[in-house]
Image (tube, rainbow, N blue to C red):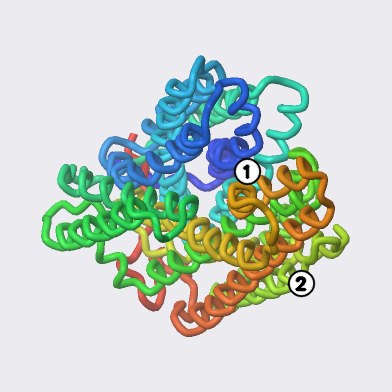
Amino acid sequence: MSTVVAPGKGRWWALGALALSLLAVGLDLTVLNVALPTMSVSLRADTGQLQWIANAYTLVLAATLLPAGQLGDRYGRKKLLVAALLVFGMASAACAYAPNTGALIAARAVLGLAAAFLMPLSLSVLAVLFTPAERPKAVAVWATANSIGIPLGPIVGGWLLDHFWWGAVFLINLPLVVIAVIATGVLVPESRSTTRPRLDPLGVLLSALGLLGITYGLIRAGGQGWGDGLAITTLVGGVVVTAFFVVWQRRTAHPLADMTLFSSRAFTWGTVLTTVVNFAMFGLLFALPQYFQAVNAASALVTGLRLLPMIGGLLLGVRVADRIGRRVAPRPIIASGYVFLAGGLALGALTGPHTGYGFIATWLTIMGFGLGFTMPTAMAVAISPLTAERSGAGSALQQALRQVGGAVGVAVLGTVLNSAYQSHLSLNGLPAPVAGAVRGSVNAGVRVAAALRSPELLAGVRAAFTHGMDVTLWVSAGIAAVAVLLAIVFLPRRSATMSGNGTTHADDEVGVVTRTEREVIA
């Protein structure tokens, strides 16, 4: 027996419960960054172990996104959401009290597994709870909760490290999880696909290996450089396996990822444009905290606080875009958002070693405004063709591509940053080992300059890194400018609208989403 989700405020309270779970996921993506130096001392972890602590989460998350979406469609999205929240909470506690690096890495991997269910299933529920006319606002809340957690991570982490031990950065998840479990259990209705899609074991294996290879290769290339043999081997291997996965999905009768979604311009280009946003945002969040800490000598907490203008701009952008979106189609909103994003990044590229924070706060606000305009609207466009039957698998496919986009951003823009930084250094007269350490990273360069008591070397290192960051921001601004053209040329001209008989129409939807398809199977 299927029933239509009743209108009313209950759906919006349910969305609030989902937003809490996404806030925990967003926090966990970046809160670890400020805790790694403390962990290296407390756990006696070397650089390789610290990398695995950070990357175990991302790798498992990327590898399990697609099967998570299909399992939600088959067994029930609410059921798996609650289970994922409980696992996320238990894994957070295990991280906080991990006695050694091996235990911490394992617990981080379990965190990634839980997040792989939380991200696509929380998004897929929106396709069931809300009408197409309501989805842009619902997705804006979802995307804002997901995005705010990322810059909040360094703020929360820095404050906790100033007052407690490193495990506290994981315990912050527990109250969020408890509230989200109760609210999801009470407010979110159960939903699943009425067709009970069969599992695709080979598709699960191929997608996991492909995404794992691509993500690991990009992460390693970002850290070791594009000349690293293992990075290139795993990256190429991941691409080849992913190609086999695509071929298999087109041949099997029960695909894990519905490739027909890419026949929709709305899904394809909405997904591409949200992926480009992730590319630019993760690249910025890779470079700017290093600028604050190494060039401006700011603490972890101060670094996080200096990112607040981006959050303010994002919240304002989401609010303005929501109001405009009631009267204007998504295409000009997304294109305008990328104009703001490109302009903010271009202004950021004018930052120097001694630039005042007022200027930095200005371009961060503009960039955040562009993010608020672009990300929720593009995500709403991408999920507009999703019927309730395939909302889990479709949302998982979109989230998998976003994760890869973030990994590509860190790897590519990290390489640009390192190359520009190293090319701008002047290390004449320094012994080879010392010069090599300075070339390794700006943080190492600052430590070497302090040990040598050389103001000239310190100024040179800071100027070189600022040059590298500026080049990186110019590249990001160029990518955002290209995205403006992509939005204008490829996005559908009209948004989905409700006709008098309750059927949704858009100019290129894969299928129509009717009121009866927004069903809840108890």
Label 1 is placed on what type of residue? Answer: Gly
**CA neighbours of label 1 inside 10 A, class few (<14), some (14 to 19), many (20+):** many
> What residue sits right under mark 2 in the picture?
350
Tell me the element at label 1: helix
> What residue sits right under mark 1 in the picture?
149
The quadrant of the image that shows the N terminus is top left
Tell me the element at label 2: loop
The quadrant of the image that shows the C terminus is top left
The residue drawn where x is 26% and y is 40% is 74
Looking at marks 2 and 1 on the same chain, the residue that comes earlier in the sequence is marked by 1
Residue 308 drawn above or below residue 284: above
Residue 175 drawn above or below residue 255: above
Left or right of residue 199, residue 361 in this image:
right
Residue 521: quarter of image: top left
- Percent coordinates x, y for residue 492 in the rendering: 45, 78
Front in this rendered view, residue 442 or 210? 442
Residue 476: quarter of image: bottom right
The residue drawn where x is 59% and y is 52% is 432
- Percent coordinates x, y for residue 487 in the rendering: 51, 78
Front in this rendered view, residue 115 or 389? 115
- Percent coordinates x, y for residue 459 in the rendering: 80, 58
